[in-house]
Image (cartoon, grey):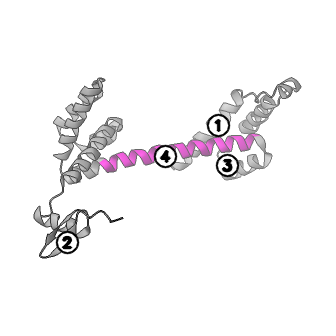
Amino acid sequence: MSRKPKKGYYVKGHFVAEGSELDLELRAEQTGGEPSRTELKKESAELQKVGEALLTLRSDLMERLDLPESLLTALEELRRITNFEGRRRQLQYVGKLMRQLEPDTQQAIRDALEEQRSGSAQQTLALHAAEKWRDDLIASDDALHAWLQAHPATDAQQLRALVRQARKDAAPSQDEVSRGQAPRRGRAYREIFQIVREQLEQEEHE
């Protein structure tokens, strides 16, 4: 069974297969190294996504960017539109305005979005840390001792009282055990979390 011939062309007696490195090099030379239509389409789609993400950017970060009025107006219009086709067209317009921005401004937008994402990730980690401390404090006296040593500014008497109450609240009755019900979580459980979270945040900003 004969192999299907590759598509391509000859240059100075040499066969150049379509899609090969040599083919791409020759095409780049012909266009003066300018980006292909595919590359432009890809860049346009990426800038549309970045433009749409601007709708979620915090106001303080947005103000820092000092974006042109035309783009800010287009974004406000995009936020308002709910119709699918209308939104798609407006998003294309936002992408067009994004392409007109200086490369430095485009990069500043990406940096601001990344800064916001990193901040959100840090907040999530801080919440998880506070939740783990709360659960450990209720579960173990060793954890309570470790917390008070690591965070001496904590009101030890208040925290001990809350831990005792949370343990009492969580102790299941025989009936709850037989029914397989989850332990109750009362006010003390929530207040321990609040104390831990506030203490961790305060130390982080010191």
- Name which residue lies at 31% across and 49% down: 110
Whichever of callouts 3 and 2 sits on the residue coming sooner in the sequence is 2
Which of the two labelled residues, at mark 4 and mark 2, occupies the earlier sequence position?
2
Residue 187 placement (x, y as % from top left): 69, 27
Q: From where the camera sits, is residue 202 visible?
A: no
Q: Where's residue 94, x and y in %?
A: 22, 37
Sequence-wise, the earlier of marks 1 and 2 is 2
Between the C-alphas of marks 4 and 1, the distance is 19 Å
| Tag 4 residue | 121
Camera-nearest residue between 147 and 155: 147
Which residue carries the number 1 mark? 193
Q: Is residue 162 visible?
A: yes
Element marked by disc 4: helix
Where residue 50 sits: x, y (%)? 30, 43
The quarter holding residue 48 reads top left
Disc 4 versus disc 1: nearer the observer: 4
State whether the magenta stretch is mostly helix, strand or loop. helix
Magenta segment:
110-138
